[in-house]
Amino acid sequence: MKKAGIRIEDLHLSFGDTTVLAGIDMEIYPGEFFAFLGPSGSGKSTLLRAIAGFGPRPKGRILIDGKDIADLPPWKRNVGMVFQSYALWPHMTVRQNVAFGLEERRMPRAQIGPKVEAALDLVGLLHLAERMPSQLSGGQQQRVALARTVAIEPQVLLLDEPLSNLDAALRVQMRRELLSLQRKLGLTTIFVTHDQEEANTTSDRMAVLDGGVIQQIGTPQELYDTPVNGFVAGFLGTANILAGHMNEGCFVTKGGNRLAVDNYRGTASRIVLRPQSVSLADEERGSIAGKVTHREFLGSQIRYLVGTEDGEIIVDTLHHAGQSGHAVGADVMLMIDSRSASLLD
Amino acid sequence: MSDMPQPASGAGRFTLFPRLSGVAITGILIAIFLMAFLVLPVVQVIYVAFLDARTGAMTLQNFRDFFNTSLFRESFVNSFYVSAMSVVFATIIALPLAYITTRFNFAGTAIIQSLGFIPLIMPPFVGAVAMSLLFGRNGSVNLLLDQYFGFKVPFMEGLNGVIFVQSIHYFPFILINLSASLRNIDRSMEEAAQNLGSSGMRMFRRIVFPLAMPGYLAGAALVFIKVFDDLGTPLLLNVNTMLAPQAYLRITGVGINDPMGYVISFILVAFSIFALWASFLFMRGKDYATVQKGGGGLSKRDLAPREKLIAWAVILFILALVLAPHFGLMLLAFGTIWSFSPLPDAFTLQHFGTVFTQSSQYIWNTVLYAGSAAIIDVILGVAIAYIVLRTGLIGRKWLDYMATAALAVPGVVLGIGYLRMFHGVQLPFGLGQMSSFWGLIIVALAVRRLPYALRACMAALQQVALSLEEAAESLGANKSSTVRRIVVPLMTGGILAGFVTSFATAAVELSATIMLVGRASDAPLAYGIYLYMQSPAGRGAGAALGILAVVIVALGTYLSQRIIEKDRNRRAAAPGAEQ
């Protein structure tokens, strides 16, 4: 099957006075696993639903495989969507649920049977074909929903927070299965989530949304290492954002500390420091003095909040068995590896 | 939990088994009451249906006689036909209304909601005569049709009249259930179907309709039973070839020992139980309420101008139908002579004068009977609810089952059961025969309305957080003062709503009452209406009484709605309330 790309051009949508999508432009490459990441109300689900054809018609263009589908009703789009609630029909068996889309396409009966079985086999649930959805666990329902969607061989697969109704352990397992299924089928896939870990672990590229605007698009690593603004920096992982200015190849913080940065020309008013690039050091090697105000034991790491002249700084240190680390109230020195830090305007 | 012994409780000093005894005694008293006035009379009726009247042996002969008599066969078929057709017509009325409110943004939604209860505030037998004056062979509508178009429609001929009146009265049961289950379908159910390529009528048939089916069937089963069991409407329309009227006529005409009345009663009870059981089966395992958090029912769309016009036409037509009995009753009550003309000749207040001067005893009897019955209902309701939900009394669920079973007992059957059981029992203090004592009417009304009051009390008690009781107990209050000072005050809203519902519906109950009224001076409103409506001369006064009945029920419905709303607001404001 030919892999389809998606192009979204200048998409706008408002509900009354509230703007939900404010000029979305993006390109999703054929066969890509793409994530929409953002907090609730950021417009990520609305955008996904717009691609599927639900909700009011937005202004702008949505092209799948080069064809504008923005004016087509949902049932003519050939875009498969897995709903957050799975939306399995409780009055039909698993088999009937999966066969539904094929029947609606007026496929001959003789072809429907094998296709349904293939789809159920793909998600490993062929043995439960005659069950009712209410007799399945959450993870199984999820797989049925997936089988029902891929059975129609859509051009694009849309997943609306597919893992949010599962418990933590199952979530990790399912996201691996989702990814391997996507690789097997080669389907262009969009995955909506508010969970950065889900987006990081699954997607080839992702778009971070906030307030109906795309903040940044890139691979998970690009977004983590070089966030373009404070929102992206704070939303992906934990970040210390210190204010200051550039001076002679160094970033000078408000508290007067000079942090060396590599190859950066231009101005900046903030610097993003990840907790793991800050460490607790001896008197002579450290550069910033502070006092431990808070301490959290996280298992593999100990996270300290250290009060300094530049405000509270979060420091992650690896934990080794038997070590007790620093107590709350202890005076410490911080050493900062700032060469690879991102600078923001 | 609450059935743990409470060593610190004050009652412990006076009795050996502090709480258990009080609860157990209450439970046993309630069980005795329900056995005596609900279970035994009904069992007795069923038993007699299988009894040879002469020899006293068990036999199926009575049933053979029943089905060998053409009158009874006809009645059986008629009852079945009328009930089924009423379901069909009620569906035809309810379906478009439910569809319009749940699928479209429509300005007339408020009207549709009022359509959901306007019919219910008038007992169908009250409007029956008014309907035949409006729609009968020589009624207003047919006179006008004949004059302008030269034809008549037999709306009210024979069984048609019963079907017509009943479907207009009972369609709200289908409307309410069907709209509720349509509203409970999550939007994603429909979207998933569209996403997979389905749309329009095909999607409605394959997804929406099957999901709404359980709600529809529940409503339809209820309509079927209500129509099947109803006595007043066929009697007032002078249709006697149906089961309930036949049972009544046999018992009052032929006598208390005629087995046919009992055979019919058995059939009525069997059908009621079967219909309830069938609807329970349909509902079981089909909790299709699929609304997710943030869901909110099917997506609604705006109507195109032409569709809007059609929708309004449909709604106004149904509104006219629904208001017809009310309108007809008004004309009858305020009109002088109304015969062979579209409207009464003139208008007068004389009928109300007649009612108040000659028949005020009907009103006072109704207040006394329905009021006492409602008080009994809330007392029993609170006690049963508390025992079932808060104690570990053995067999407590059976109190609930027994009380609720009254739903499946037609009024005629309960009346016949009382006559049979208490026939010949002499009461002390010169109160005469028990079966003709007016107090028995109160008991019958209380038993018939108990399920409603019980549900209201159960719901109210479930809203009271257990921790509120535990707090009182930990501060030293014993069970009885916890119930008196904490539980009952917190249940007030629900109890009041239960009282008002019981009162309003008991005030217009006819089917059990009609069997038990010993003399006219003991009769309540509903019986008075029935008596007046028998003769053309009394119709005006009967209609005036009918209007009083409608006012009572309407006020009651309004009050209980207000109480429930106020209670809900108060609860929302109070901290510690359980969801």
Image (spheres, grey):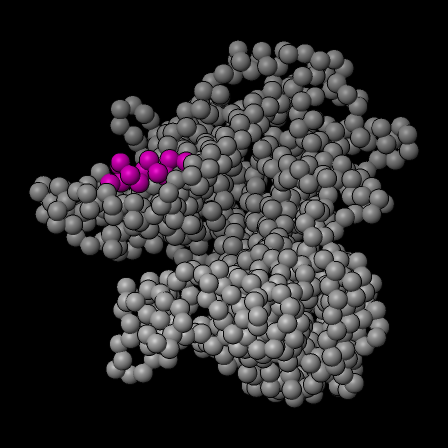
Asked if B194 appears above or below A108 in the picture, the reply is: above
**Does B183 sit left or right of A109 as displayed?**
left
Q: Position of residue A9 (x, y in %)?
A: 79, 66
What secondary structure prevails in the magenta region?
helix
Residue at the location (45% across, 61% down)?
A255
Is residue B483 inside the magenta stretch? yes
Nearer to us in this view, B436 or A188 = A188
Q: Position of residue B435 (x, y in %)?
A: 38, 33
Nearer to us in this view, B562 or B436 = B562
Number of numbered callouts drawn: 0
Asked if B141 appears above or below B353 in the picture, the reply is: below
Q: Position of residue B272 (x, y in %)?
A: 52, 52
Image: magenta residue range: B482-493
**Does A68 sit left or right of B328 as displayed?**
right
Residue at the location (49% across, 36% down)?
B565
**Splitting the image into 4 quarters, where does residue B208 fall?**
bottom right
Residue at the location (53% across, 27% down)?
B555
Asked if A239 appears above or below B263 in the picture, the reply is: below
